[in-house]
Amino acid sequence: MRSCLVEEEMASGLEGRLAGLACEVRFGERLAPYTTFQVGGPADALALPKDEAELVELIARCWAEGLPMSVLGGGANTLVRDGGIRGAVICLVNGFRELGLVEGDALLVEAGAGVKIPALVRFAAERGLEGVECLAGVPGTVGGALAMNAGTAERYAGEAVESVRWARLAGGGVETLPASRITFVYRGARLPEPGVVTSVRFRLRKGDAEALRAYLKEHAAMRRERQPWGVPCAGSIFRNPPGERAGRLIEVAGLKGRRVGGAEVSRVHANFLVNCGGATAADVLELIGVVRARVREAHGLDLELELKIAGEDLP
């Protein structure tokens, strides 16, 4: 484990290199509170820009100083290892929450990357707009929904995206990127190069507001019944193999309720791992290994992770 003296020296050096920035920067901040799993070690520097101007300035400084940058977003579908993340971690929880119709186009909704997904879904439904109801019950933020191309087994967020605003990590200002330049795949969206999405424009369709509200109510009840609620988790852990459901494979393998330390295979839905209290990233990773090995033994299939893993293990 890094000594306190070494950590203090690193923080002091980073403070000087990032001094004078408009955005808030926290040094040595634990990332667990910034993830829905509530697990994770410290960031060397956690940067919390409130708007695009602060983000552009931050990226330019990190680029000039040769500091590695990574994006945490809203912290859903992410496991941060216990050793934390080196360099600057960009988190958008302090801003980027604008949400509204684009002037002159009643079917075009723009949402900041920090907007909570339920807020976007409700905003569209109240106006009788269809296209993002596939995100009902999905945790996290709009930026995360784009990055994961979130949705159901039949429909995905990427189908409704018209464009995004983004800033390249290689520097430069914020620009508009049309959806045609984004490669949407199963549970993923590939930008032309690494960058930070600041907002997303969705092209929606006119629908029936009452029917949409009823759908959302029914879907929310179904998700609460079939997925764990009230405990820290990161959403689905594994991708569904072709023609199969990862949750069913794990359940048939007898793994519901299996625990490693504070991490447990959910007793409600087997493709969710939950933090029962005090879980470490090492616990979660060990449990993932147990699940993969048992499913391989029982079904002859190798489960692929949907969960994103970031950072370093403890030395």
Image: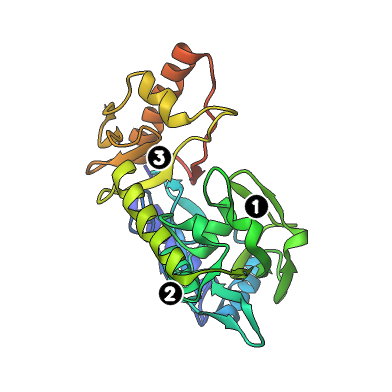
Q: Which quadrant of the structure image shows residue 146?
A: bottom right
Which dot marks residue 314? 3
Identify the amino acid type marked 3. Answer: Leu
Q: Quadrant of the N terminus?
A: top left
> Is 155 positioned to the left or the right of 49 in the image?
right
**Mark nearer the viewer, 1 or 3:** 1
Q: Secondary structure at mark 3?
A: loop
Residue at (41, 17) in percent of width and height: 294
**Mark nearer the viewer, 2 or 1:** 1
> Is 86 positioned to the left or the right of 177 in the image?
left
Which dot marks residue 33? none
Q: Crowdedness of circle 2 by 10 Å Cα count: few (<14), some, many (20+)? A: some
Q: Secondary structure at mark 2?
A: loop
x and y percentages locating residue 292 in the rendered image = 46, 23
Looking at the image, is mark 1 or mark 3 earlier in the sequence?
1
Which dot marks residue 94? 2
x and y percentages locating residue 61 in the rendered image = 62, 73
Q: Crowdedness of circle 3 by 10 Å Cα count: few (<14), some, many (20+)? A: few
Count of number-bearing discs: 3
Rounded to the nearest whole Å, what is the CA distance between mark 2 and mark 1? 24 Å
Q: Secondary structure at mark 1?
A: strand
The residue pinned by badge 1 equals 189
x and y percentages locating residue 100 in the rendered image = 53, 81
Position of residue 115 relative to residue 309, above or below, is: below
Residues at badges 2 and 3 in contact (C-beta under 8 Å)?
A: no
Rounded to the nearest whole Å, what is the CA distance between mark 2 and mark 3? 29 Å
Identify the amino acid type marked 1. Answer: Ala
Looking at the image, is mark 2 or mark 3 earlier in the sequence?
2
x and y percentages locating residue 45 in the rendered image = 46, 63
Looking at the image, which is closer to me, 310 or 299?
299
